[in-house]
Image (tube, helix red, strand yellow):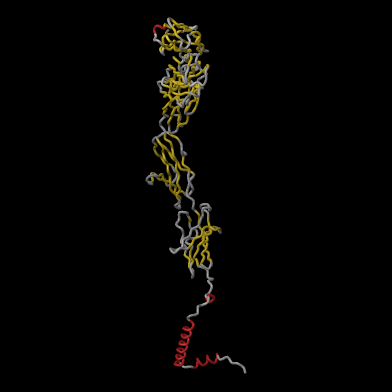
């Protein structure tokens, strides 16, 4: 049996119904639909049910007008773009190449393009791309005229030019063709001091000594602003020469030598350094002349006059600045070539010394004042109240040297040789009663003494007291026993020329 589509019949039935029946049918259908919605409310809608966004944004305007002049100083342009889901990103292209990219903020759309690579006065195509969240993109292009570079210019005279005070003409050149205004302004107040709106771009001012700062502001026809500046040294004063001095580095004991030199003159040594302080804001050179001959340029003169025998010289210093203003000062100097003169030195030459140390002292004279004196070549030296103590290590000749330096660095040496003798002399009784012998009347006692540096004397001691001294070899004494008690003690003592001594053993005698 064939099936029959009932739809045509249903349509015909509906069409045949009256208005009342139709209303009743609609109410029943609405009730059934409501029941169906209640039954299905817990089931979520499927993602596949949402339609995909394939509609690109629509750009009404990129915010620029065809043929307008685009400047870097211009506020970023404001595009007008709409999209059913919202624009998220804007991008600008310049002549088809990427320029910048912007996220769309809640505050609205802003965009700009980088035209720094486009020469001023040249047309450039700025394209705006607008992206929605689905990645759909729209674009619109406007052609503008680029003018994004700040004006530049050249100031003359050039910066760091040195000049005298007075009228000064400052010119700004090498300006772009569309320059509209050049202003001379103050950096401290920001205010314009003088303004030019057409060529010649020249300013006249009056300078005073010191540093003069020139600042100009350049504005082109489209409002781009550039700045330039120059500094000038205004100098009406020649250099000043001061603080001339002679010096020499430490010669002994780290004592430096410094002598002030004035135009009245000074005494200097044959070797050292002459120094002058020349001050000027544009100092160009300093020259040193000795007896009219140029010897050096710069702040110092390495003075070495040892090859000469002169005792005086004339030193001239000339200082010149960048404007050829020159100052000259002449200093007469006396040249002291003589070291300190020794007037006394102890011990004497070939003197005999003894003990663990001996003291040396000296006296000198020098018109330039002694600054140091020292012993050289001896490791064992210590201060002593009357000079310097030398500690010999063995007997025999010992040479020591004093070194003296005056305040000009002149040096003198003085040497002495002494004989160190710490060896006692030899002493022997050659004739005398034996110990504990009985004696009476006058008793003869003789002795022999010896020393490599000579015997000075032999002494006779009775009961420990000195009673006689013999200074010549063949030393002999006579003892008058009547002058002493029933018993007494006798002893001999010998001294060498250095002061070393030796004694015989004591003998005891009884008077008989």
| Residue 200 seen in render | no
Taking depth in this image into account, of 380 and 132 the one nearest to the observer is 380
Q: Considering only vertical position in the picture, is 428 above or below 218?
A: above
| Residue 489 seen in render | yes
Task: Pick out the residue farthest to the front.
Answer: 512
Task: Pick out the residue farthest to the top.
Answer: 441
Q: Residue at x 47, y 63 (%)?
A: 104
Number of marks: 0
Taking depth in this image into account, of 231 and 107 the one nearest to the observer is 107
Percent x, y for residue 115? 51, 55
Q: Considering only vertical position in the picture, is 95 above or below 484?
A: below
Percent x, y for residue 363? 43, 17
Q: Quadrant of the N terminus?
A: bottom right
Q: Quadrant of the C terminus?
A: top left
Percent x, y for residue 165? 40, 34
Q: Residue at x 49, y 47 (%)?
A: 176
Q: Position of 56 compared to 261: left or right? A: right
Q: Quadrant of residue 323?
A: top left
Task: Pick out the residue farthest to the right.
Answer: 1
Task: Pick out the residue farthest to the bottom.
Answer: 1
Q: Considering only vertical position in the picture, is 297 above or below 141?
A: above
Percent x, y for residue 59? 50, 66
Q: Considering only vertical position in the picture, is 410 above or below 138?
A: above
């Amino acid at each position: 049996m064939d099936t029959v589509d009932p739809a045509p019949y249903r349509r015909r039935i509906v069409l045949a119904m009256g208005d009342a029946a139709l209303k009743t049918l609609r109410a029943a259908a609405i009730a059934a639909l409501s029941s169906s919605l209640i039954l299905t409310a817990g089931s979520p809608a499927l993602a596949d049910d949402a339609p995909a966004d394939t509609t690109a944004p629509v750009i009404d305007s990129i915010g620029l007008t065809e043929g307008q002049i685009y400047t870097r100083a211009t506020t970023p342009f404001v595009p007008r773009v709409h999209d059913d889901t919202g624009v998220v990103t804007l991008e600008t292209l310049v002549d088809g190449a990427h320029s910048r990219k912007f996220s769309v903020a809640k505050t609205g759309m802003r965009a700009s393009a980088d035209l720094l690579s486009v020469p001023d006065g040249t047309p450039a195509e700025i394209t705006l791309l607008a992206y929605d969240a689905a990645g759909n993109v729209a674009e619109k292009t406007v052609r503008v005229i680029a003018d994004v570079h700040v004006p530049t210019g050249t100031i003359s005279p050039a910066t760091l030019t040195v000049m005298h005070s007075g009228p000064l003409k400052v010119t700004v050149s090498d300006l772009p063709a569309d320059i509209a205004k050049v202003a001379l302004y103050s950096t401290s107040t920001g205010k314009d001091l003088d303004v030019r709106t057409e060529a010649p771009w020249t300013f006249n001012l009056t300078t005073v000594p010191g540093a003069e700062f020139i600042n100009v502001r350049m504005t082109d026809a489209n409002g781009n602003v550039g700045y330039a500046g120059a500094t000038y040294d205004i100098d009406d004063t020649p250099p000043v020469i001061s603080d001339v001095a002679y010096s020499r580095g430490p010669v002994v004991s780290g004592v430096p030598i410094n002598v002030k030199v004035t135009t009245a003159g000074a005494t200097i040594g044959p070797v050292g350094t002459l120094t002058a302080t020349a001050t000027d804001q544009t100092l160009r050179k300093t020259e040193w002349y000795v007896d009219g001959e140029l010897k050096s340029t710069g702040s110092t003169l390495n003075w070495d006059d040892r090859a000469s025998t002169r005792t005086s010289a004339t030193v001239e210093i000339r200082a010149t600045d960048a404007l050829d203003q020159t100052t000259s000062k002449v200093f007469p100097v006396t040249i002291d070539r003589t070291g300190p003169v020794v007037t006394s030195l102890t011990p004497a030459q070939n003197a005999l010394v003894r003990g663990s140390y001996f003291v040396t002292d000296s006296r000198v004279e020098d018109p330039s004042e002694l600054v140091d004196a020292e012993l050289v070549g001896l490791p064992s030296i210590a201060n002593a109240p009357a000079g310097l103590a030398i500690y010999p290590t063995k007997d025999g000749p010992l040479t020591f040297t004093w070194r003296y330096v005056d305040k000009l660095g002149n040096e003198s040496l003085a040497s002495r040789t002494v004989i160190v003798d710490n060896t006692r002399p030899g002493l022997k009784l050659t004739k005398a009663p034996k110990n504990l012998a009985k004696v009476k009347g006058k008793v003869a006692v003789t002795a022999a003494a010896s020393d490599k540096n000579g015997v000075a004397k032999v002494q006779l001691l009775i009961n420990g007291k000195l009673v006689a001294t013999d200074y010549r070899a063949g030393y002999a004494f006579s003892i008058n026993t009547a002058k002493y008690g029933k018993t007494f003690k006798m002893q001999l003592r010998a001294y060498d020329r250095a002061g070393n001594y030796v004694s015989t053993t004591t003998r005891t005698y009884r008077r008989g």
